[in-house]
Image (tube, helix red, strand yellow):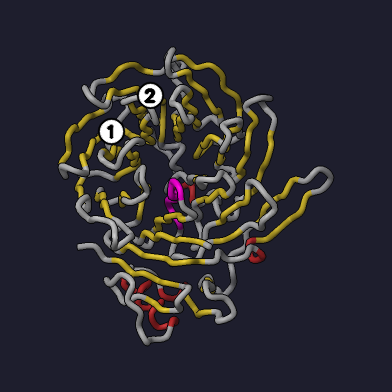
Amino acid sequence: MLSLVRLNYNSGGYGNKNVVGTSTAGSPHEEMSENYEESSASSSMIQGFDSRSSSSVKSYTRGGKFHESSEINHTEDQQVLVTEEEFPEVKVDFQETFLGHNSPISRCRFSASGSNIASSSIDGTVRIWTYDSSTASSRNATIYCGSEVSALSWECRSDRLLLIGTANGGIKAWNADAKRVVCDLSTSRNFPSILDLKCSPVEPVFVSAAASRRHGSTTFERTGFANLTVWHMKTWKPLTVLPLGEDPPAITSLCFNHNGKILAASATDGMIHMFDMSAGLQITGWPAHDSPVSSVLFGPAETSIFSLGSDGKILEWSLHNQGQILWSRDCSRFCNPESFKTRMHEIALDSNGKRLLVTSGLVRAPIYQVQGHESELRTLPHSSSITSVDWHPTLPMYITGSADHSVRVTSIL
């Protein structure tokens, strides 16, 4: 059963638990407390509603203070320090909370059309659901994978296929129309952990980033050597293994360009690698961070690459002048070293390429302005850390998954 809570900020009404779009006469503070309690979260995080803003919910730590974060805004001649407390809160059109998981969220992704959402939790459960009551729920499903889900990737041309990668090296292909697993693959015994999966936007292929295991205190230290395999999505057979050299450090994140000809990959040694998919060869690479790279994305015009390091720095790299940094932010207060012990942080870029959303070890996540002169923003709070993020493919709408077991869809004004 899907459990959804809709909060409509324009009308001032708050949805009943498990009911979409129904307003109540209860106070906002009472309803918010009930929603957080139902999602198995600490109610001490939500202290009140600020009537000065239609979308303002105050988020406090147990000590009663806002968490602080900072960014360095690089201008031509100066650096401006801005604390997270000064970030305006997003102005919300509506927000809907999905309470169908029983453990912390590991991944959440919009489908190609944006109509469906896949979310996974560390107990190995994947849920497919929709946030809009006018959208057919025929694809809604629950998939039990038997191991922690570490990667989700929808087919890029339709909402039909979902790829699921697990921490024990399994890759499942779920047909959302037929509601069944159409293929169940396994990586080699030498590389038993799936770190990422990405479908080509054009060709019927996908790439898996798998890694060997070793002992360590952080997520990065527990990953060993890398394996990048290209798979065919009709035969479900491996096509080739992309070359990375001898004993390469683990690949943490993958991203295709718009026509699927170039694949970017980030690694635990701080490198970014670029592959020509037609030739199956690496064409360039550079040291992007002095620490492991957690997430990588092509920029909006594909003339740049964004990277997030475990040092908490977000860098935009020029693809015309290799090594040149075009834009940067320090989000180390959100992506602090402690939070990297249990997971890798990720970044997501909106459909216009203007806003960059980042996961967070705090209850709020930052939204950085990449283009234009609008201010940075912060999300409304979950009641625990934010573990996964994604943007709708066409609308000003994002999803956040949290360690409080909830997934939220937020439409912003």
Q: Nearer the viewer, residue 182 or 115?
A: 115
Residue ID for mark 1? 169
Horizontal arrangement in the rendering, residue 138 relative to residue 63 (left or right): left
**Amino acid type of disc 1?**
Gly
Name, please, the residue furthest toward the right.
77
Q: Nearer the viewer, residue 282 or 371?
A: 371
- Which residue appears at 49% of the width and 52% of the height? 359
Horizontal arrangement in the rendering, residue 38 relative to residue 402 (left or right): left
Can I make out residue 110 in this image? Answer: yes
When asked about the image quadrant of residue 203, the answer is: top left
For the residues marked 1 and 2, what is the alpha-carbon distance in whole angstroms? Answer: 11 Å
Q: Would you place residue 352 above or below residue 19 in this image?
A: above
**Amino acid type of disc 2?**
Asn
Q: Would you place residue 268 above or below residue 394 in this image?
A: above
How many numbered marks have been drawn onto this rendered protein structure?
A: 2
Q: Nearer the viewer, residue 55 or 340?
A: 55
Which image quarter holds the N terminus?
bottom left
The first of marks 1 and 2 along the sequence is: 1
- The residues colored magenta run 386-394
Q: Is residue 389 magenta?
A: yes
- Which residue appears at 74% of the width and 55% of the height? 81
Residue ID for mark 2? 227
**Principal secondary structure, stretch drawn in magenta:** strand
Q: Would you place residue 51 above or below residue 221 in this image?
A: below
